[in-house]
Image (cartoon, helix red, strand yellow):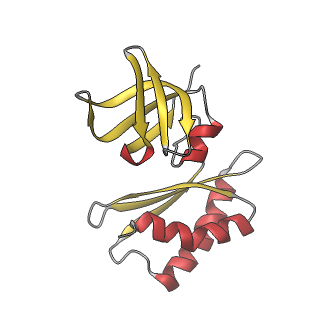
Amino acid sequence: MAKITDKIEVLIQPVIEDMGYELVGIEYIASGKHSILRVYIDSGQSIGLNDCETVSHQLSSIFDVEDPIMTQYNLEVSSPGVERPLFNIEHYQRFLGHDVKLRLLRSVNGQRKFNGAIGSVSEANNSIELMTDTGSYKLDIELIEKANLVAHF
């Protein structure tokens, strides 16, 4: 069964691209009437408040007609920011060698949270190699619940 975010992605990706933006990813946090649908967008230039507002209005119109989420939720449109979330294998390839922090759906070697650098990406196996202080780990992309770049200042 497809996740709600997959269904929403199919619905909104063409619209966002037609507006000149890249759909980075979608997060849906179910929490009753306080649920959040967060849509991350990017472009060749920096993303500003006006960009987020424009996309939000367009998506709201689509969601009013299509109604992909049957419960109450808040729509947030955001730039990915400096600690950019990673959603798919293309993101891991794009940021090969960068430091990431990630949380897994289930533990590997007794832990669910990892910090390290993306050492390699295997599209054939849909996995990444994460280089950490304690060694390297081969992780299936489907096992990753949440991943973000680590900003170094």
Q: Quadrant of the C terminus?
A: top right
Using residue 74 as the reference point, say whether residue 105 is left or right of it: left
Quadrant assignment for the N terminus: bottom left
Observer-nearest of 51 and 133: 133
Name the outermost residue toward the front. 124
Q: Is residue 131 above or below residue 56?
A: above
Name the residue: 39% across, 43% down: 144
Q: Residue at x 51, y 43 (%)?
A: 85
Residue 80 in sight from this viewpoint: no
> Seen in the image, is 99 located left or right of residue 141?
right
Q: Residue furthest left?
A: 110
> Can residue 32 be seen here?
yes
Q: Residue at x 49, y 46 (%)?
A: 126
Q: Position of residue 57 (x, y in %)?
A: 60, 71
Residue at image x 62%, y 62%? Answer: 53
Residue 66, x across and y down, in percent = 49, 83
